[in-house]
Image (cartoon, coloured by chain):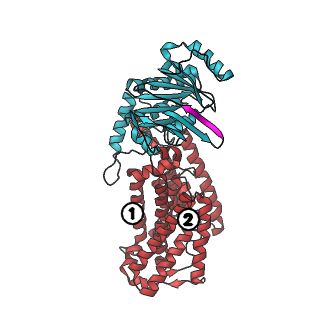
Amino acid sequence: MIDIHKSFGEIVALDQINFEVGYNEVVGLLGDNGAGKSTLIKILTGYHSPDKGEMYFKGKKVEDFSVAKARDLGIETVYQEKALADQQSLWRNIFMGREIKNNAGFLGIKEMKDETSKIMVELMGFTSTAVSSDSVVKTMSGGERQGVAIARALYFEAELIILDEPTMSLSLSETKKVLEFVEQIKKAGKSCIFIDHNVYHVYPVADRIVVLDRGQIAGQFLKKDISLEELVERLYLVARTGKLNKNSVNQL
Amino acid sequence: MVEGFKKLSRFRLQFSIFLVMVAIWILFIIGSPRAFLSFPIYASFMSTIPFSAIMALALTLVIISAEIDLSFPSIMGFSGWVFTIIFTTTGNIYLAFFACLVTGIIAGFLNGVIVVKLGIPSLVATIGTMFFWRGLVMVCTGGWGKSLIPARDTVLYSTLVGRIGGRVPAQIIWTIIVAVILWLFLNRHRFGAHVYLIGDNVESARMMGVGVDIVKMIVFSVLGFCAAFAGVIASLEVSYYWPSLGEGYLLRTMSAVFLGGTSVFGGTGTIFGTFIGALIIGCLEAGIVAMGLTGFWTQLIYGVIIVISVAIHSQVRKRSPI
């Protein structure tokens, strides 16, 4: 994304944003409430179109970006509350909107269940027999649900998976599960944007961390260049002054 | 063994409503063995239950998709009028039947359009169309009914409401056919999968590319179609078109759906449950009277049964392990 601007009325939500995600890179996107994280994501997924700026995907310029187009390109977002239909079985959720069916539209239920069982073992690491492809999603824990949504995106070959605050209101052990799923994305050779306001969740799994503040990118760091302690310190600085100090890596 | 239990527990809700029906049935047999151990009362059930059962089956889809329709009894009345007027003026019962079904579909589709395209909540929208269609019936008929006696000699009459083997009312077969078709589409077709997803989490359904609007419009249209079909059956059964056709069906039909375990919040519900629910609602009145209680007891017992069954459902749902 190059030079993205977005305003709502008089409020400038995003200003001069240059943002990129590399192949097989996990980018942590940090920022306080109102920093513009969700606006950025909504532009990335085609919900909003930017007022100004250009977007490229795999080196090609994307015109007339829309939700459908984003999906076609393989950009998939996992929203915590909106990802799954709680009262439906696991297999129905995995294949939501992309059912295996014959020409008349009748479902290949057995195939979908078999595939779901495979996904559970291979992508989600479920080995217990307590959960089956027929299990209803609402009986699963928050972390597991995130896992289902991530596994679904991976199964359908999403190139870029956007996780919108996946650890919000999750317990410690559930958060750990989600982080493991993020590592799965990396292992599968796909890219990921991990949005959170908790640096302790983002830091362990991200390759690069981008800090957004008041509609601008305040700075970005490669994980290998910065320690967690230093990052935390910088974030406090941003919160107070809106600026990281002069050492921040603005260009990569 | 564990697998088997898991499979069973998936059908717990359906099983529990089935048990409620059996319990009521046993009560009736004990209370009035003479009536409930002979065929005639069942023949009468089979002739009257289909009217609301057919609509209840289609209403199940609407409620699973987290919408509601209050206008189907009026659609039943209006489509019945279309059927009657075309039949009595042209004498062509097939044309009348076809026009009636099309009217039902259009009326249902209109509900869908108002809900989906104008974004009016279905409760409000269908209150409007409920009055509209009923009002149209009143204006068109001036409150007068029409005899359908000439229809009795037609093949359509014997196909829809004739007596198979001289005893079994044909409409119960049609009800079963409707149930099987709707079950098939709800459980084995992509359309049904989308109905469940939309009712459960419309946001995620939309995000995953489900055609929310079109599915909702189809669901309303199916109910319109079934209301028209039930209207023809009900009118042919008595060989008379009453302009009040459909009145009194609203709450019974809805109770059949809720008795059957469909959640008012959408996302869950079964055709089997509704079918059983419709049987229970349909047999209560006659059963109560046959047991020697006066008809005044009916509503009270309806109330008790509905509250108990719905309470059972909510408990079963809460404890459901899967």
**Residue B208: quadrant of the picture:** top left
Q: In this view, does B127 lie above or below B142?
A: above
Colour cyan, chain = A
* Lateral position of residue B189 relative to residue B243, left or right: left
Residue found farthest to the right: A240
Q: What chain is the red one?
A: B
Disc 1 and disc 2 on one polypeptide chain: yes
Say which amino acid is labelled 1. Answer: Ile
Work out whether residue B320 can be spotted: no
Q: State which mark lies toward you, 1 or 2.
A: 1
Dot 2 amino acid type = Gly
SS category of the residue bearing label 2: helix
Residue B195 location (% of width, % of height):
47, 52
Q: Does the magenta stretch include residue A18?
A: yes
Residue located beneath label 2 in the image:
B287
- Residue pictured at 54% horizontal, 29% vertical: A195
Please tell me which residue lies in front, A210 or A144. Answer: A210
Q: Can residue A17 be seen in this view?
A: yes
The magenta stretch is A9-24
Disc 1: CA contacts within 10 A as few (<14), some (14-19) or many (>=20): few
Closer to the chain start, of discs 1 and 2, is 1
State the residue at coordinates (57%, 21%): A199
- Write the residue at 60% across / 72% down: B132
Q: Is residue B145 above or below residue B289?
A: below
The secondary structure type at the circle numbered 1 is: helix
Q: In this view, does A197 lie above or below A107?
A: above
Which residue is at the far left?
A103
Front in this rendered view, residue B140 or A228: A228
**Which residue position holds label 1?**
B177
Q: Mark 2 — on which chain does it sit?
A: B
- Residue B214, percent from left and from top: 46, 57
Query: Which of the image's four quarters has the N terminus of chain B?
Result: top left
